[in-house]
Image (cartoon, rainbow, N blue to C red):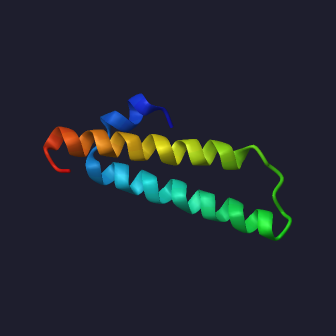
Amino acid sequence: MKTKELRQKSVGEGKEERRKVRREQCNLRMAAATGQSAKSDQSGKVRRNIARVKTVQGEQSRAAGNR
């Protein structure tokens, strides 16, 4: 997901997106542990997506005055 799309979402939708990406990361870890991982590049992409979501959430919380 692109940063621009994340910024347009509400806080609740952002939290749901973060849960979704974390779940995807967990699934990739489990697949790698069992030797089923066919997409080795996906783990890096998921990690960057998590960072992107967390960055946008931090920006939104600072904009709202919540630290």
Q: Position of residue 48 (x, y in %)?
A: 56, 42
Give the residue furthest to the front.
Answer: 67
Residue name at image x 83 percent, y 53 percent: 38
Residue name at image x 82 percent, y 71 percent: 34
Q: Nearer the viewer, residue 8 or 56?
A: 56
34 horizontally vs 65: left or right: right
Q: Nearer the viewer, residue 2 or 52?
A: 52
Measured along the vertical axis of the image, is residue 66 above or below residue 7? below
Residue name at image x 61 percent, y 58 percent: 25
Number of residue marks = 0
Residue 44 image-quadrant placement: top right
Q: Position of residue 1 (x, y in %)?
A: 51, 37
Q: Position of residue 5 (x, y in %)?
A: 40, 33
Residue 41 image-quadrant placement: top right
Give the residue furthest to the top.
Answer: 4
Residue name at image x 41 percent, y 47 percent: 54
